Amino acid sequence: MATVSNDLLTAMNGTSSSSSTSNSSGLTDNSPDAIQNRFLTLLMAQMKNQDPNNPMDNSQLTSQMAQLSTVSGISQLNSTLATLMGNLNSSQALSSANMIGHSVLAPGNSVQLTSETTKDASGNDVTKQHAVMGVNLATNASSVVVTVKDSTGAVVRTMDLGTQASGVVPVIWDGTNDAGSKAADGNYTFTVTASNNGTAVNATALAFGTVASVSTAADGIKLNVSNIGTIKPTDVVQIL
């Protein structure tokens, strides 16, 4: 019977107005059970209305049953994968939560200069400034230069790090500007240039921040990091 294949595809896709099953929201139900029910409904209707002089071909029926089995298997596989993805996201969220309170380096060019007051051996107050940032070098470099700028874009401090091996290089700025005096606490930006014997080296600026919280979104797990913003866990280059 030539119409078996087309009707079966209709049943599998849930487009038959007479036999498709809908959920409470009006959407077509494409679960394995619903697909099988639609197939059997159409099959019984076709068998009842088949031409006695041209009955349904057994080989054709076997082929359609095999197609139904394949479609049902794919539907079950999709359901299993959805469950696994849900479990994976939950696992990633719990794992990422362990990073709360930890400091990290991630791509970015912001740096925050802060002051800290401590006591020296004589009990006197000593105030020190510091700012943490980093550089990620693709290859070894014979020259690495970090340039710190203020909010107007003016250069505050230029630091020559000299020769550095490939990978992550943490950088600490003591707050001293190029004139030898102390810069004001606050937010700055920085750029990085690197070369190896005159050949440019790919260098990525890394901002420093502390993971404050973890959130879940449609596009995955997100880390909310001070001084950096919202990033993916995979954006973290180094945990300090």
Image: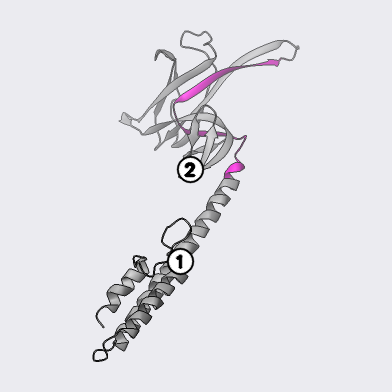
Which sits in the foreground, 142 or 37?
A: 37
**Nearest-to-viewer mark from 1 and 2:** 1
Residue in front for this viewpoint, 98 or 125? 98
The way the protein has been coloured in the rendering is one colour
Magenta span contains residue 105:
yes
Image quadrant where residue 69 sits: bottom left
Q: Residue at 52% of width from left, 21% of height from top?
A: 112
The residue pinned by badge 1 equals 31
Tag shown at residue 234: 2
Task: Please tell me how crowded label 2 is: few (under 14), some (14-19), or many (20+) other residues with Cα within 10 Å.
Answer: few
Q: Which residues are magenta?
A: 96-120
Q: Quadrant of residue 202?
A: top left
Question: Which residue is located at x 36 percent, y 69 percent?
Answer: 18
Q: Nearer the viewer, residue 175 or 22?
A: 22
x, y (%) of residue 148? 44, 18
The amino acid pointed to by label 1 is Ser
